Amino acid sequence: MSVPADAAARRRASFHELSVSAVRRLTEDAIEVTFGVPPELAGYFDYLPGQYVALRMQMPDSDGVDREVRRSYSICAAPEEFADGSSEIRVAIKRDIGGEFSTWANAELAAGAVMEVMSPMGAFISKHGDVSNVLTDMNHPESMVRRTGNYVAIAAGSGITPVMALARSLLMGNPDTRLDLVYANKATMDVMFLEELADLKDRYPQRFALHHVLSREQRIAPLMSGRLDAEKLEALLGTAIHADDIDEWFLCGPFELVQLCRDVLEARGVPRELVRFELFTTGRPDRPEGQAGRPVIVDDSESTYKITFTLDGLTADVQSPTHSRESVLNAALRVRPDVPFACAGGVCGTCRAKLVCGTVEMEENYALEPEEVAAGYVLTCQSRPTTREVTVDYDG
């Protein structure tokens, strides 16, 4: 498999132009988009099942002025390289209410379009039996151990996207692997990848168990009808799923569902290190996700923080007014627009950096593992200085 010569460039988020080779309708409100990856870029788009990419493009605002928009989407296919060295990236885009990009993509995106796609990132991957897969050493599918194990995935709505890649890879990788999937939706018409899930069930009838839970559609089994709450989840884990010998759990969906599942599993005594989770929303609608550095005016007469950051071996300084409550990421973007970020909401982990000097307050963290925080890593989109000088290293 081809890999870029510069390992640091592969590790850090970088954007490359890719052509859309296909757009396929999944549901009335969701599409699957396939990007072709030419051989010369294949190494930059190596990925592990469960990771995501960010898409970047220029879109006009209400005044008709173009501004940068970034959106992150999980990869829904297992890694594969073709005979000519090329590969592909597939993502699913579900139309969100008020979602400008997702609405545009569902209505207008077509094969032949060219978009900027970020190299794959993310820690929502299987680590069972392979502790070497840490956040700074990903994008190496050739090192993925084909391991046996018992897995459970719980997803809701578009949270199925990364789970599809994980399910395909885990089931295909080892003939003794077993996977239970609990998938919650409003109704059958809202189920993304309905045919693909049925195909997996037909292909692995003894090893893949699929449990559709529909909140607004009556099913034969009462347990599979209605909203997936704590009582229903406990019942599922006590009957339909053999939950006592699970090697790894995957949770993906909105904040409320993921937190509910984490609480139930914790109460059952499931070790925290066996639970992988990814959020599609933070549960904080009052805090919209950022797209680029917000304007901040620095007055020489005012008190400021000095923020120093290193990226690609280059170091830069920026002054941040103490009254502005500016994040480290926002300050860095004002002087260097290629600083890596995707969601700016504390969810994806793209803006991760190591705190070298000073202290910060990290307001939210849905992406870093406890051991990463203990090692000094922070999410710069959520970190605000609490000392006069702060230094972070994006290369660390």
Image (cartoon, helix red, strand yellow):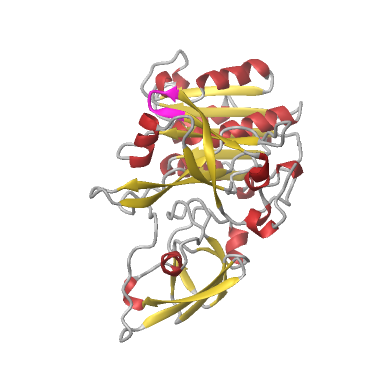
Q: Can residue 46 be seen in this view?
A: no
Point out the residue furthest to the bottom here.
301
Magenta span contains residue 129 = no
Could you tell me residue 223's position as x and y percent? 47, 22
Magenta span contains residue 30 = yes
Q: Can residue 109 be seen in this view?
A: yes
Instruction: Name above or below for residue 144 compared with residue 10.
Output: above
Q: Residue at x 38, y 37 (%)?
A: 102
Could you tell me residue 322's position as x and y percent? 35, 77
Chief SS of the magenta region? strand
Point out the residue furthest to the top here.
220
**Residue 135 picture quarter:** bottom right
Instruction: Name above or below for residue 284 compared with residue 192.
Output: below
Count of numbered tags: 0
Instruction: Name above or below for residue 195 compared with residue 287.
Output: above
Q: Which of 235 and 211 is in front in this view?
A: 211
Q: Nearer the viewer, residue 81 or 133?
A: 81
Could you tell me residue 180's position as x and y percent? 61, 28
Point out the residue furthest to the left here.
63
Answer with left or right where residue 136 lies relative to residue 68. right
Answer with left or right where residue 371 lies relative to residue 56. right
Could you tell me residue 209's position as x and y percent? 61, 22
Answer with left or right where residue 275 lies relative to residue 142. left
**Residue 280 picture quarter:** top left
Q: What stretch is highlighted in magenta?
A: 26-31
In the rendered image, the quadrant that contains the N terminus is: top right
In the rendered image, the quadrant that contains the C terminus is: bottom right
Q: Residue at x 44, y 18 (%)?
A: 222
Q: Nearer the viewer, residue 81 or 196?
A: 81
